[in-house]
Image: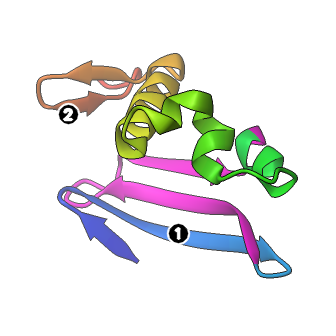
Amino acid sequence: MWQRETVSGVTLHMSCNGVGFADAVLLWHTTDPRYMATDLGSGLERLRWLLSPVSWAETTFGIDAEHVDVDVLDAVRTATLLIMAGVRPSGHGLVAPYAA
């Protein structure tokens, strides 16, 4: 189990022949566990990386990985996926589409 500020979670890492290729995450709001989310991190970029001779950063972000900090690129990618999933940003954290 882990905790970062107001979010707690559990991460299960999956590997094959010693190479990590996926993870499953269950996370929840620490003080209000009614707000939960799951993530199965076995995206196509990970499968492509396993078959590729280049680094994970280059496989995932292409040539941008050479010019922009990978943490920034990953944050932008994560934010894009959240917005595409219907999670709205707000002044007080993220508000799920079903929240009143």
Residue 8 in the image, given as x and y percentages of width and height: 32, 64
* Magenta highlight range: 19-44
Q: What residue appears at the point 38 percent right and 37 percent down from the top-left corner?
A: 75
Q: Up-down: is 78 above or below 34?
A: above
- Point 60% across, 72% down: residue: 12
Residue type, mark 1 in image: Thr
Residue 74 image offset from top left, x and y in percent: 45, 39
Element carrying mark 1: strand
First-in-chain label (1 vs 2): 1
| Relative side of 10 to 56, left or right | left
Q: Quadrant of the C terminus?
A: top left
- Disc 1 target residue: 11
Seen at 51% across and 29% down, the residue is 64
**Measured Cα–Cα span from mark 1 to mark 2:** 22 Å
Name the main secondary structure of what is drawn in magenta: strand
**Residue 90: percent from left, percent from top:** 20, 21
